[in-house]
Amino acid sequence: MRKLLLFLSIIAFVGLSSCSKDEVTEISQEEKELLVKQMIIEFNNSAVVTGKLQNYFDSVAELKSQENGTSEDELEALLQKFLGDQTQAFLDLYYQLEDMNMTGEEFLSIAHLFNDLRLQITANLGKSSETECNGTSLLNTFLDWIRYCEAQESEAAE
């Protein structure tokens, strides 16, 4: 009888602990929105105010203007260098969003709630970028959102 009671107690404990782990790993929409908002604010402080974003855009434009053509590897290397130049606070938030497997569409749906922050970033950025928009990763989608790429694409379709 004691063995049966011990066995049932162990099964109940394992069952309850597995249920509580599922609840902890689920992230609410409000938490996602807060993470995206914090990431946008940190990006403004990390890349825009410091001029690193404009330097990145200038580097991409310079690379694309070269006659020998631009490879995807060179663009990816520039993007990784740019990412490595950011503050730890921004990187922590960015990697949290990546770890959640946030898609570009999900990011854009949340980011549109914070268009006022985008306007602050573009005001701090000064001149606009002439680089092409291509949201192939979460970071590229974020950079495209800053540059209003989806707005340009919808205007071209009309």
Image (cartoon, rainbow, N blue to C red):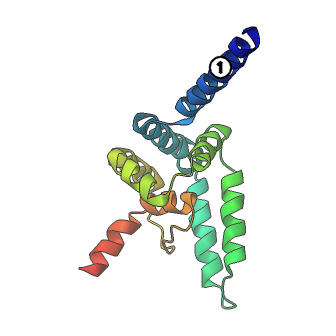
Q: Nearer the viewer, residue 40 or 36?
A: 36
Q: Nearer the viewer, residue 16 or 112?
A: 16
Q: Is residue 67 left or right of residue 23?
A: right
| Residue displayed at 64% across by 69% down | 59
| Residue displayed at 65% across by 78% down | 63
Label 1: which residue?
13
Residue 61, percent across and down?
58, 75
Residue 45, percent across and down?
54, 41
Residue 52, percent across and down?
61, 54
Residue 8, percent across and down?
66, 18
Q: Is residue 72 left or right of residue 105?
A: right
Query: Identity of the amino acid at label 1?
Result: Phe
Q: Quadrant where the C terminus lies?
A: bottom left
* Direction top: furthest residue: 2
* Direction left: furthest residue: 158
Count of all numbered marks drawn on residues in the image: 1
Mark 1: few/some/many CA within 10 Å (<14, 14-19, 20+): few
* Direction right: furthest residue: 3
In the image, residue 11 sits, relative to residue 153, either above or below, namely: above
* Direction front: furthest residue: 1
**Quadrant location of residue 55?**
bottom right
In the image, residue 156 sits, relative to residue 31, either above or below, namely: below
Q: Secondary structure at mark 1?
A: helix
| Residue displayed at 66% across by 85% down | 66
Q: Quadrant where the N terminus lies?
A: top right
**Quadrant location of residue 10?**
top right
| Residue displayed at 72% across by 67% down | 77
